[in-house]
Image: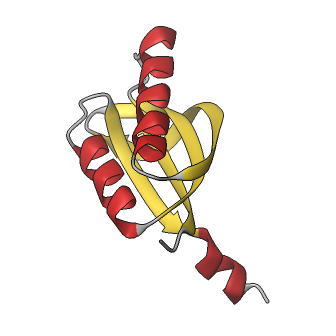
Amino acid sequence: MMLNNYETIYILKPDVTEDTNLTLVNKYKSLVKENGGQNVFVQHKGRRHLSYNITHYYDGIYIQMNYDANGSIVKLLQKSMRFDDQVIRSLTVRQDLLRDVNL
């Protein structure tokens, strides 16, 4: 199975508690690993002001997750985030495509 390198950045609601934050991070990390993803690396980017308000929120908690996975894992992750009330926005990009552009 061919694995590509992906980066997902998601924004949590600003009023999410630290416990909920960690629970969600572990949930998404586990989701990737349990479905065959590898090398999952999570960075907490902290609370940041949003450029424009998203569903009445002016700031949010940014989380960056880098991992190796295939397209079906990414679809599963994105679907899970889309239906999670605590996630106000998410974006996934394939990293190896970006590396090729920089050469």
**Nearer to me, 46 or 95:** 95
Decide which of 91, 76 is in the foreground and name it: 76
Tell me if 13 is positioned left or right of 64 in this view.
left
Residue 51 shows in the view: no
Q: Where does the image place residue 99, in percent across and percent down from the top left?
A: 71, 79
Q: Position of residue 70 (x, y in %)?
A: 44, 66
Q: Residue at x 33, y 39 (%)?
A: 88
Instruction: Answer whether residue 59 is visible to the viewer in this image.
Output: yes
Residue farthest toward the left in the current orientation of the protein: 83
Compared across the picture, whether 2 is left or right of 13 comes to right
Q: Nearer the viewer, residue 36 or 15?
A: 36
At horizontal 41% and vertical 47% (from top left) the residue drawn is 52
Front residue (pair 33, 92): 33
Q: How is the image coloured?
A: secondary structure
For the point 54% across and 37% down, the residue is 62
Q: Position of residue 12 (x, y in %)?
A: 42, 31
Name the quarter where the C terminus is drawn. bottom right
